[in-house]
Amino acid sequence: MNDKPIIRIQNAVKTFGRDIHALKGVNLEIKSGEVVLIIGPSGSGKSTLLRSVNRLETLTSGNIWIDDDSVTDQNSDIRKIREEVGMVFQSFNLFKHLTALENITMAPLTVKKTSKKEAKEQARQLLDRVGLGDKEDAYPGQLSGGQQQRVAIARALAMNPRVILFDEPTSALDPEMIKEVLDVMLDLAKEGMTMLVVSHEMGFAKAAADRVIFMDDGNIVEEGTPEELFSHPKEDRTKTFLQHIL
Amino acid sequence: MAEIKSSRIEVSDGALVPDKDSHSLFSAWKISFFGAVAILIILPIVWPDPYRDILKFIPDGILKTFQVTILSIIFALIIGLFTGLGRISRITIINRIATIYVEVVRGIPLLVQLFYIYYALGKMVHLPRMTSAIFAMSFCYGAYLGEIFRAGLQAIPKGQMEAALALGLSRSQAIRKIILPQTFRIIMPPVGNEFIALLKDSSLVSILAVSDLLRRGREFASTSFQYFQTYTVVALVYLVITLFLSKLVAIMEERMQQHER
Ligand SMILES: Nc1ncnc2c1ncn2[C@@H]1O[C@H](COP(=O)(O)OP(=O)(O)OP(=O)(O)O)[C@@H](O)[C@H]1O
Ligand SMILES: [Mg+2]
């Protein structure tokens, strides 16, 4: 892990309409290779924060940088930045009309103009890596939730991103499928991938997270190592929340 | 809070679409379709005069009807695609133009549009009848298909676009490679129904003296004075064609539902 922050979020404010204040001035730095977990009650702004990092949401004010590229500057080439930032969604969002393999090759072929042969080779390796080597011709509808999410992770990896954002990657899954997805994520963490993860999976947090961040009501309330935050929370709000989910 | 029950009723103006009981031996569809076919076979056998002559005279018209229908649906699909995209566009001016087009077309009867394009505009630019007919039909159905495209585009979950954007695709790449292919798939059955509706409406072009199925019938009837016999055959031929096509649409729909699972 080196010390240069790869993601810098400075005073991020996001309002929807007049009176929904989803983010109220969030500051956060993620270093290269760090695995950071975000927890917090529903509506606290976790997704909004994550989605602001690749500009699926546009901040009302504040700044976000990936390395030295500004995400929030309307003149910056957001597509170039998005190539560097993978995203995995709660509802997988696999392209329904494409096979597992085609889902993975889509972006390399269209965005990076990789050759067909190369893209396929890479996609097959990625499918092997997530344990789905035999599913390349399956359509999303023919895969279980856990399998779909693993394809989605492979799809994000195909662009060789420097950071991957995970928004509740396991909360749409049946309990027996959660582990297969978390195992893939654990491997990624071990390999040094920079990960910003919204999740309430304590096991994953303890095994892989360098830092846990507790958000409430559009603010970061408290942060620390998993041990610090889970076992010795300082703030009352954190304590109350942890009592609910533990 | 009391729940408000919606009491919408839906009655399509399409041809009889085979429903669940269509697998039974005497479904409404089977009775209508095979009944019509049987009558068309029996009539010329029992009364060769005039039915044989009628059946010899009108096939040219059937071809013309299909020609008008197929060409119109092709142009209407192209217009409909851009109209649908325009209707969901975030660029105000494009959105407005598309919406106005749809509203205007839907507010004017097709027959009036045909007259307008052939006779009124014909004063300025003279278009051949066939061209006017196809132009008017495409112009009108482009708006209907535009609404189907719009509904289809909006039916694609937002996450599909977001996933594509997050991977670095541009908005237009995402539309071309992710959204439209899925849209085409889901709008196939409604487009099939519009095709059938267009085929029926194409009988209106006979007033421009395009010799379609109806016009051929009229020509035959007015020289032979066999009005009852001629129009019976014309009606039955339309019926057989539309019932056949609606069966195809129903099969397509069923296949798609199975594919979804
Ligand atoms: N597109 C939107 N339009 C209006 N309000 C929104 C929109 N997206 C989010 N919000 C609101 O912003 C606030 C933060 O939402 P966000 O989705 O970031 O919360 P979250 O922490 O991810 O919650 P959850 O755990 O339920 O996913 C909520 O009040 C939500 O209703
Ligand atoms: Mg969320």
Image: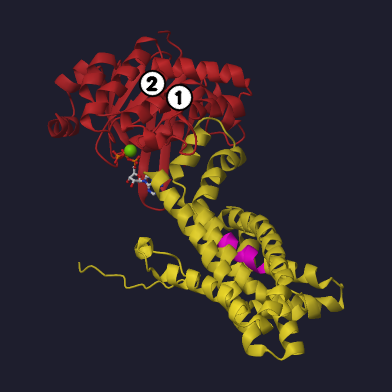
Chain colours: A red, B yellow
Say whether residue B146 is magenta.
yes
Q: Chain of mark 2?
A: A
**From the viewer's perspective, is B12 left or right of A187?**
right
Residue plotted at (50% across, 41% down): B161
Taking A188 as reference, is B7 above or below it?
below
Task: Name the one closer to the observer, B63 or B96.
Answer: B63
Would you identify the image quadrant in which residue B11 lies?
A: bottom left
Measured as percent of width and height from the top left, residue B150 is found at 54, 57
In the image, the residue with mark 2 has its CB under 8 Å from the nearest atom of ligand 2? no
Q: Could you tell me which chain the residue with mark 1 belongs to?
A: A
- Amino acid on which the number 2 mark rests in the picture: Leu
Residues A116 and A70: in front is: A116
Q: Quadrant of ligand 2?
A: top left
Q: On residue A132, which mark appears?
A: 2
| Disc 1 secondary structure class | loop
Is A75 rendered above or below residue B71? Answer: above
The residue positioned 41% from the left and 16% from the top of the image is A128
**Which mark, residue A195?**
none
